[in-house]
Image: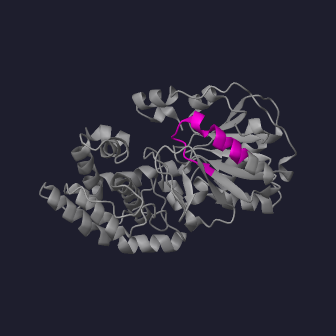
Amino acid sequence: MRLTNLPAAMAKRLAELECPDFKTRPWVEGPPLARRRVAVVSSAGLVVRGEKPFRGRDPDFRAIPGTTRPDQLLMSHISINYDRTGFQEDWNVVFPLDRLGELAAEGAIGSVAATHYSFMGATYPVLMEDYAREVAGRLKQDKVDAVILSPV
Amino acid sequence: MIEEQGVATVAISLIRPQTENTKPPRALWVPFELGRPFGPPSDPAFQRRVILAALRMLEEGGGPVRIEDFPDDDPRERPDPGWEPPFAGAAPVDGSTAALADAFEAELPRLAAAYEQSVKRRGRTTVGLSGLPISAAAHYLAAWLLGEAPASPVADMSAPLALRFVLDDLKAYYLEAALAPSSKPSSRQLADWLWNETAAGKAMFALRRANLDAADERLKLIASNFMVPGIRAVAAG
């Protein structure tokens, strides 16, 4: 977003929020996009209807199968300070599964992952590390070689 | 963390300074409001451009840290002058919380038809975190507003957590009902209607005020942080 659109104090708070300081600078290369298997990893607190929603600052994740229908996906993020009406109107605003399916069908990407993942981003990054490694392991098992990290 | 484990990533960035400080391998900054990483709803062509702009960074070098900027604003951030809310103006109340609670519960049936049509048109709803029918959710909120401190109506869920999920469900119900066909309201139009024109909005403001000093720390936290958006709470004073 354009921080200039916010009240000055709010913009300052967002711009100066303490961010994790990662010690490494990894860089993974791979095949052309038309051969890549793509997954979404969201921080929107997404959960399949009927499964346990994120309840607080939970650092774990939920698996979102690629066969999930739009009416099956809920958002249980703890913050109420971002727009949800975009997601309410169209899930692709936050979880673009339909768009990825179209891109795969036309050959722009190789394929769509069997499973996608969601964290609830308003938590403590250091507590997420083991879960992030677990998600990476599951992505690799599914031969995913391209991940879009999607915030809210 | 995922790239470190050997899987290439590209992040969508909504707040550029945070991305600059975090230094991911690749990031596409987008100028959209928080909550819209892939841009406007119901605009497949635009969303596709965002996704491809991000994914194409995976084919390019220039690491270990690259941030690019998506150039176009979300066209849905502009208000739609043709949009009309399900109803305009909450029924007047005499200032008592009992009257406000009654007005709020009486307001819900005014939305039922619009909500059902909206769900049918979109094929989905995001209501469901509390698991309660919407009338039961509204009744639970009204009980809190009346100072009853009701027990949780949901097994395995504390009363404050049930309240938080009820709040999420009610907001979703109202906002989904307001997604009128053949119009493209901005998020601002929708939120202004909810918070300024409905008994539900007034009820949530009142509940927040009543519980900012609650003895239950969980309730106090919900009242201060998870009931009314910060920017609106500050504006209301």
Q: Give the left or right position of residue B162, taking residue A94 as reference.
A: left
Magenta stretch, main secondary structure class: helix
Location of residue B89 with respect to A28 vertically, above or below? below
Give the extent of the magenta segment.
Answer: A118-136
Taking the magenta stretch, the answer to whether it contains residue A119 is yes
| Figure coloring | one colour
Q: Position of residue B12 (x, y in %)?
A: 64, 41
Q: Position of residue B6 (x, y in %)?
A: 79, 39
* Residue B198 visible here: no
Q: Position of residue B216 (x, y in %)?
A: 28, 44
Q: Give the left or right position of residue B189, taking residue B102 as reference.
A: right
Question: In front: A5, or B211?
Answer: B211
Q: Give the left or right position of residue B152, taking residue B19 as reference.
A: left
Taking the magenta stretch, the answer to whether it contains residue A103 is no
**Screen quadrant of the N terminus of chain B:** top right
**Screen quadrant of the C terminus of chain B:** top left
State the residue at coordinates (65%, 52%).
A117
Question: Splitting the image into 4 quarters, where does residue B194 fall?
Answer: bottom left
Question: Splitting the image into 4 quarters, where does residue B155 fall?
Answer: bottom left
Q: Position of residue B113 (x, y in %)?
A: 38, 75
Q: How many marks?
A: 0
Location of residue B143 with respect to A78 vertically, above or below? below
Question: In front: B71, or A66?
Answer: A66
Q: Give the left or right position of residue B68, taking residue B56 as reference.
A: left
* Residue A89 visible here: yes
Location of residue A94 with respect to B32 vertically, above or below? below
State the residue at coordinates (51%, 43%).
B34
Question: Splitting the image into 4 quarters, where does residue B133 fall?
Answer: bottom left
State the residue at coordinates (70%, 57%).
A115
State the residue at coordinates (56%, 67%).
A71
Question: In front: B124, or B39?
Answer: B124
